[in-house]
Amino acid sequence: MKRKRFPWLEIVLLILVLTLVGILVNNLAVNLIRTGLGLSFEWLWQPAGFALSEHTLPYQPGDSTAWALLVSWLNSLRVIACSIVLATVLGVGAGAARRSLNPLLRQLAALYVGLIRQIPLLLQLLFWYFVAFLGLPSEPMAPVGALISLSNQGVAILGLNLSVEFSAVLVGLSVFTGAAIAEVVRGGLDSVPKGQWEAFRSLGISELLGLKKVVLPQALPAILPALSSQYLNLAKNSTLAIAVGFADLYAVSDTAITQTGRAIEGFLILLLSFLALNLLINGGMQVLNRIVVRPAQRT
């Protein structure tokens, strides 16, 4: 009978990590005492004193800083959720096109992925904001009938009004992350044996139906883990929204820290807020994994 190994290495690493954390906390406490600041969160209940360019909940500058942070957290959650949906659609479409029998689709998808992944996200956000959206005429234009209305004041989709800042961040994050998701999807599709592709094609099944019913269910176990990483990257990349003036959590936290001088408390709140966002995304992907992947593996 094989003897169990005592986890000496894990215990040593845990002790080292706890020691490092203890040293950091001690240094922080000593420096706070030396400067006479101390830790305080009373500033959260004081009036924020600044306006937010957009908010999903009622907000006035006289509201508390805590309320301003909550509203900005919801702004971040909204743009991240919408970007995840749009990036997934773009990524799955481009990834599937990379394995299409149509050479034009393959080349266009390869061009999209290759070009977008070589340009920094910050530059793309600035392009979408200053060139694509602010460069629009002031009079609304409707390129898709009455469904979408575009102007340098914002975007209206079926009566839903989106600000220029929100639209720039949404498109920038979606296009950038969509290119990364396309590579994830392409790798997942490549993991499916070629015989599966040849089988549905020999039966006369169309490419779209065969991809949906035969190939994609088998590729999901390889796609979903990497897809979770891309969603988490999207959430972290959303902090670049400050470059285009979008009132997200990072931008509002930075303003609050500047006004109150409470950098340590502000960054602690910022870290915990993004931890909550990442836990939401990770938990959602785990639920999706149980609903989609495990039944597919059983069949």
Image: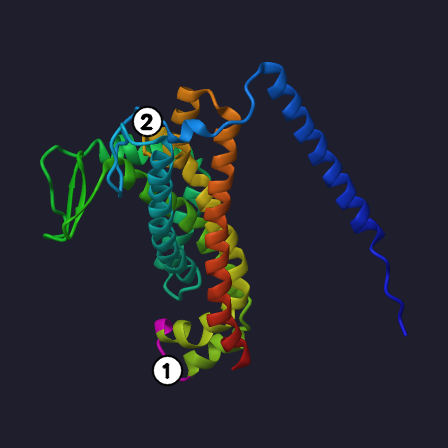
Name the residue located 73 percent from the left edge and 40 percent from the top edge: 17
Q: In which quarter of the image is residue 135?
A: top left
Query: Is residue 60 located in the magenta-colored stretch of the structure?
Result: no
Alpha-carbon neighbours of circle 1 within 10 Å: few (<14), some, or many (≥20)? few
Q: Nearer the viewer, residue 175 or 255?
A: 255
**Which of the two discs, 2 and 1, sits closer to the camera?**
2
Residue assigned mark 1: 204
Residue assigned mark 2: 47
Q: What element carries label 2?
A: loop
CA distance separating discs 2 and 1: 67 Å
Q: Where is residue 29 in the image (x, y as percent from the top left)?
A: 64, 25
Q: Earlier in the sequence, mark 2 or mark 1?
A: 2
Name the residue located 51 percent from the left edge and 73 percent from the top edge: 218
Q: In which quarter of the image is residue 30?
A: top right
Q: Position of residue 266 (x, y in %)?
A: 48, 30
The residue range painted magenta reads 203-208
- Look at the numbered discs 2 and 1 and tell me whether their residues touch, using CB distance below 8 Å: no
Q: Where is residue 13 in the image (x, y as percent from the top left)?
A: 77, 45
Q: Where is residue 169 in the image (x, y as percent from the top left)?
A: 33, 39
| Amino acid type indicated by mark 2 | Pro
Q: What secondary structure do most residues of the magenta stretch adopt?
A: loop
Judged left or right of residue 75, residue 180 is: right
Above-or-below relation of 80 to 204: above
Residue 264 circle label? none
Judged left or right of residue 228, residue 50 is: left
Name the residue located 90 percent from the left edge and 74 percent from the top edge: 1
Q: Which of 33 and 25 is in front in this view?
A: 33
Q: Residue furthest bottom?
A: 203
Alpha-carbon neighbours of circle 2 within 10 Å: few (<14), some, or many (≥20)? some
Above-or-below relation of 207 to 281: below
Question: Is residue 2 visible in the rendered structure shown here?
Answer: yes
